[in-house]
Amino acid sequence: MNSGGEPERDDTGLPPVDIEIPDDARELDRDVQAYYREQRAERRRLRHHRLHGRFTRDGIVLPLLACCLVLALITGTLLTVFTATSGQNLTGLPGHGTSTSTSRPSTVVTHTGQPLPPGTLRLAGSNKQILLQSLPQSMLVLVPPACRCGATVSWLARIAASQDVTAYLVGTPQTKAEAIQLHSQLDPQLRDALQVALDNQQVLTGTYSVSGVTAFLVTGHAPQSQTVSYAQNLKANDSTAPLVQALNG
């Protein structure tokens, strides 16, 4: 204020403001409290804005979406595994819609294109000699020691009987007793279809690398055009067709 009571010139360019200075500072309490309330309201607004921004931007939404996707994938995988396992456990149970396959395992027949090796077998219980290279269409069944293969031997005897071919259950010095026992366990009608012959010189096992129950399938006209095929590791539930086909060459 100048001496005339007028406001002095202000070089800052701000508009003139009348300022009143109270005599008692306590009169400013209401203004101070209002100021504090405004400051608290502003802080609350800023906190709300920051929290809202985290949820609406990339702060938390993307991790949440990623977690949901991972959980969905894990759940789908577990459901697939449990469904497949349950289906396998229920297969073949009464009332279950899925039945087990009735197809038989494939029988692998190896064609040598060669005749049997030279040598003889001896018919069990007699002195009759069987010349291997003179055999016509026939089947030779060789069993390993302790095979417990009665069902397989019976199955092969039925094949030989159905094809009307000469068949022998061959025993070596190690399996002679077992071959005779297996023959005695056959149905009486099949015993004539599969006689016991002894390979005392082990001609067959010395020529071929056999494994499990082995059937030698001889075709052609002995001795000039005789050829032999064989199938190893035979089981009673194997497919019959490959053996029949090989026998009929």
Image (spheres, helix red, strand yellow):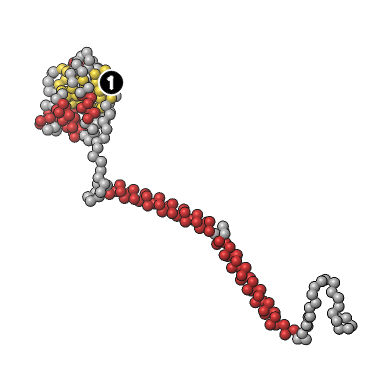
Task: Find residue 156 and report its image quarter.
Answer: top left
Q: Residue furthest top?
A: 224
Instruction: Give the vertical position of 95 relative to 218 (above or below).
Output: below
Q: Residue at x 19, y 15 (%)?
A: 222
Label total for image: 1
Task: Find residue 121 and report its image quarter.
Answer: top left
Local packing at callout 1 (Cα closer than 10 Å; few below 14, some 14-19, many 20+) is few
Instruction: Give the vertical position of 118 relative to 87 (above or below).
Output: above
Question: Where residue 138 appears, x then y in whole percent?
Answer: 18, 22
Q: Residue at x 24, y 36 (%)?
A: 104
Is residue 160 toward the left or the right of residue 96 in the image?
Answer: left
Q: Residue furthest bottom?
A: 23
Question: Where residue 20 appears, x then y in whole percent?
Answer: 78, 82
Question: Where residue 216 appears, x then y in whole percent?
Answer: 23, 24
Which amino acid type is shown beneath numbered disc 1?
Thr
Is residue 113 toward the left or the right of residue 150 in the image?
Answer: right
Asked which secondary structure carries label 1, the reply is: strand
Task: Find residue 1 and report its image quarter.
Answer: bottom right
Q: Residue at x 34, y 50 (%)?
A: 83
* Quadrant in which the C terminus appears: top left
Tell which of 148 and 215 is nearer to you: 215
* Residue 108 appears in the rendering: yes
Tell which of 239 and 17 is nearer to you: 17
Q: Residue at x 27, y 32 (%)?
A: 106
Is residue 70 toward the left or the right of residue 1 in the image?
Answer: left
Is residue 77 toward the left or the right of residue 139 in the image?
Answer: right
Q: Which residue is mark 1?
A: 112
Tell which of 157 and 8 is nearer to you: 8
Instruction: Give the vertical position of 99 relative to 163 (above or below).
Output: below
